[in-house]
Image: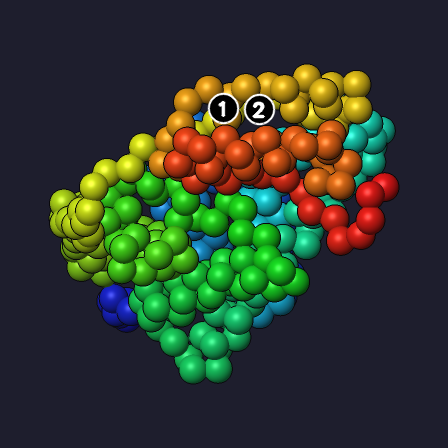
Amino acid sequence: MLRRRPASAPVPTVRGARPSLRELVLAALAGGASVLSFEPFGWWPLQFILLAYIFYQVGLGNSVKRATLLGWAFGFGWSVGAMHWLYILMTRFAHLPAILGSLGIVLLGLYMGLFGAIATGVAAWLRRRWSLPIAAFVLLVLPVTWGVSEWMRGWVFTGFPWSVSGYAHDTAPLAGFAPLVGVYGIGTLVALCGGCLVLLTQRARPWAIGLLGAVLVSGYTLRHIEWTEQTGSPITVRLLQGNVPQDHKFDEAFLASILRQYQAMITAAPADLIATPETAIPSFPQQLPPGYLENLQRFAISSGSTLTVGIPLLDGPRQ
């Protein structure tokens, strides 16, 4: 006699402790496709689908090793997709051979993928230890381990928080949660939405759709709340960007022209706050022409401006 499968029954399972090469490649491609959820593409719903895909694949088996390897492949693809532009930096501006630039991206992706492996591996271990139903696995355990793994990636060994999933939702409904839970909390909610999509393959479709809708509607509603209020008078701000080509920025032949450019931009007009980019002045203070920083300081004092200058620092004598 056939019995009806309960709503909390697990997805169909596969045998074997290791994923196939095809499964690993598809997981990596899914992770790489996440780049399309960030600007300038902005396809933020794609993150829900991609996380649902990897969560479903992890849920197919009961092996911690399988889940860990799939998460590693997904994290590897996520890292390479989001940070592929570093290849241009290393080959065009650092003048590394193409093979070394490619190897650098691969090694970075393998390291960053470890955090995806932690998320899925720990979740699979907890699922097996506690005999969790699929609903608890994809709606509670996996979202939490995903969020924690992203937080860890931002802090371990000084951190590497690029391409945190929550950054793709600055104009999406989930952005309403930002004042309450921050970017890592949004990443956890993204994973929760992915878990809801996984449950669409189960008999729990109605309340999975309801939960997904509730999260998105709540986020959209929170976006219309004013969390801050204006105090005091408005200030004037000038944000300067010299658009110096990267292959000129640290070339001694262009240093004098860069210094003149930023001095002219800074002193063009006063403002309550004048801010320059990171390393706008591409030289240590000890190596600048005499009086350069002092002239900027005199302008700031005489014009009543507060000036922030991006400049590298060196503890030591002039070199």
Residue 78 seen in the current view: yes
* Residue 259: % across, % down: 65, 24
SS for dot 1: loop
Q: Quadrant of residue 247?
A: top right
Residue 35 seen in the current view: no
Circles 1 and 2: CB atoms closer than 8 Å? yes
In the picture, the disc for residue 147 is none
Where 313 sits versus 303, above or below?
below
In the picture, the disc for residue 267 is 1
- Amino acid under disc 1: Thr
In the picture, the disc for residue 263 is 2
Name the foreground residue: 181 vs 11. 181
On-image quarter of the N terminus: bottom left
Report the Cα–Cα distance between label 1 and label 2: 6 Å
* Residue 8: % across, % down: 29, 69
Name the foreground residue: 100 vs 298. 298
Where 284 sits versus 116, above or below?
above
Residue shown at 50% from the left, 31% from the top? 299
Q: Is residue 56 left or right of residue 278?
A: left
Q: How many marks?
A: 2
Residue shown at 24% from the left, 44% from the top? 173
Name the foreground residue: 92 vs 211. 92
Dot 2, crowdedness within 10 Å: few (<14), some or many (≥20)?
Answer: some
- Amino acid under disc 2: Gln
Dot 1, crowdedness within 10 Å: few (<14), some or many (≥20)?
Answer: some
Q: Is residue 277 left or right of residue 224?
A: right
Residue shown at 67% from the left, 43% from the top? 312
Residue shown at 40% from the left, 27% from the top? 270
Q: Is residue 196 left or right of residue 40?
A: left
* Residue 271: % across, % down: 37, 31
